[in-house]
Amino acid sequence: MTPSIEYRTVDKSEWGPGPWQDEPDKMQWADPATGLPCLIVRGPVGALCGYVGVAPDHPAHGKNYDHWSYGADGEPSALEPIEEAINGLQAHGGLTFAGACGHGDDPARGICHIPGDGEPDTVWWFGFDCAHCGDLSPDMGRRRRDEGVYRDLAYVRDQVAALAAQLAALA
């Protein structure tokens, strides 16, 4: 099972007070209901982003998060069933990421995890961010901190669990 790990690496001293001051900047765990590896990673403007990983044997592994297909006439054409299913996944603001692990040499940063015993390191991550219109991003300056809703750790964790359930249902 993926170990639960938290990292605190971002200097938030210029962001002002808010729940972000006490939150980790990266967190990994295994979703208790599905067993899928999960991540929350703080993005470049301070908003949290959520991710769920699928193993190489999952039908969505290696697939993009948005599928569109058009024929020569410019009309929409049929998608593979898994592509249609991925298009239907729901998460805050919609999916904005699909890709392989990418932490480089520093596991405290990037979209990747430290796998538990017997888990693959080659998971494919699907993710979303909380830096959309109407979302508060703490590193966007004082004006932006007074507008929108900050999507805190509890909110993002709930969204990640919902995405994990949807991805597990596709397997």
Image (tube, grey):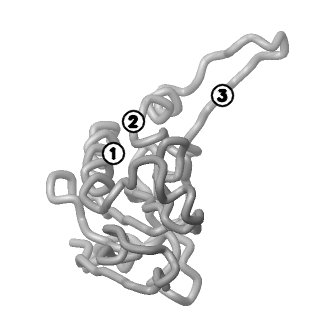
Vertical arrangement, residue 66 with respect to residue 52, above or below: above
Q: Which residue is mark 2?
A: 90
Vertical arrangement, residue 117 with respect to residue 54, above or below: below
| Secondary-structure class at tag 2 | loop
Q: Residue 7, how many percent across, how many down?
A: 36, 83
Mark 1, mark 3: which one is toward the viewer? Answer: 1
Q: Which residue is mark 1?
A: 163
Front-most of residues 19 and 124: 19
Vertical arrangement, residue 13 with respect to residue 137, above or below: below
Q: CA distance from mark 1 to mark 3?
A: 21 Å
What's the residue type where badge 3 is placed? Answer: Trp
Is the C terminus in the top left, top right, bottom left or bottom right quadrant?
A: top left
Q: Residue 99, how many percent across, how many down?
A: 56, 58
Earlier sequence position, callout 1 versus callout 2: 2
| Secondary-structure class at tag 3 | loop
Q: Residue 117, how many percent across, how many down?
A: 25, 80
Instruction: Give the residue drawn at x 47%, y 84%.
Output: 13
Is the N terminus in the top left, top right, bottom left or bottom right quadrant?
A: bottom left
Q: Residue furthest left?
A: 33
Callout 1 touching callout 2 (CB < 8 Å): yes
Q: Is 123 situated left or right of 96 in this image?
A: left
